[in-house]
Image: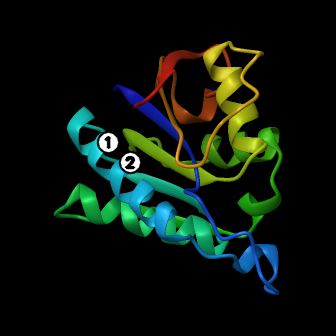
Amino acid sequence: MKRTLLLMRHAKADVGHGEEDFDRPLNDRGHLQAASVGRLLAEGGYVPDHVICSGARRTRQTLRGVLHELHLETAPEVDYTDEAYSAGPDDLLGMINRVDPEAGTVLVVGHNPTIAQLAAGFLGDDTLTRYAPATVAAIELEVDWLYAAPGTGTGKILG
């Protein structure tokens, strides 16, 4: 079974005016970016069966915008997890390793620097220092989710 891992940084968020970082919303540009990524995924035939999404407001809003543009008949299973908000690359990889083996495509919506570091590991690009808001890497895995780790697939930055 083909497995595809999509690693997405949340879209552009407000700088924050008094609210906690966890509660920062997307700004107008971020909403447009999320919709654009949804269309990009649809055009590329990337349809997530499972989603791991940080519980932060901006990641949830990003996911909502992406899924809206995919026009799916059946919504993917979504794990909203506050753990992904502060997770390091190894912690996030552990979440991916626990995904149902029947899932073909997994979308992870999270934060930098973790998403960029995890993507850099999979892409074999140690110089990946900038992972702008709404950036998505697509990695085609050669193994089951349980064994997903850098070096187990090939990928590219979409867009």
The secondary structure type at the circle numbered 2 is helix
**Furthest residue toward left:** 73
Residue that label 2 marks: 37
User: Where's residue 104, x and y in %?
Assistant: 37, 38
Give the residue drawn at x 43%, y 30%.
158
Residue 7's place in the image compared with 157, above or below, is below
Residue 3, picture quadrant: top left
**Furthest residue toward bottom:** 18
Residue 30's place in the image compared with 43, above or below, is below
Give the residue drawn at x 79%, y 43%.
113
Within 10 Å of disc 1 (Cα), the crowding (few <14, some 14-19, many 20+) is many
Give the residue drawn at x 26%, y 59%.
69
User: Where's residue 121, x and y in %?
Assistant: 71, 22
In-front residue for pair 103/16:
16
Residue 10's place in the image compared with 14, above or below, is above
Q: Which mark is residue 41?
A: 1
Q: Is any part of residue 20 visible from this angle?
A: yes
Indicate the amino acid at tag 1. Leu
Image quadrant occupied by the C terminus: top left
User: Where's residue 20, x and y in %?
Assistant: 82, 81
Q: CA distance from mark 2 to mark 1?
A: 6 Å
In this rendering, would 154 be left or right of 74? Answer: right
Describe the colour scheme in one phrase: rainbow
The secondary structure type at the circle numbered 1 is helix
In-front residue for pair 27/57:
27
User: Of circles 2 and 1, which is in front?
Assistant: 2
Q: Give yes or no for contact between labels 2 and 1 (Cβ–Cβ under 8 Å).
A: yes
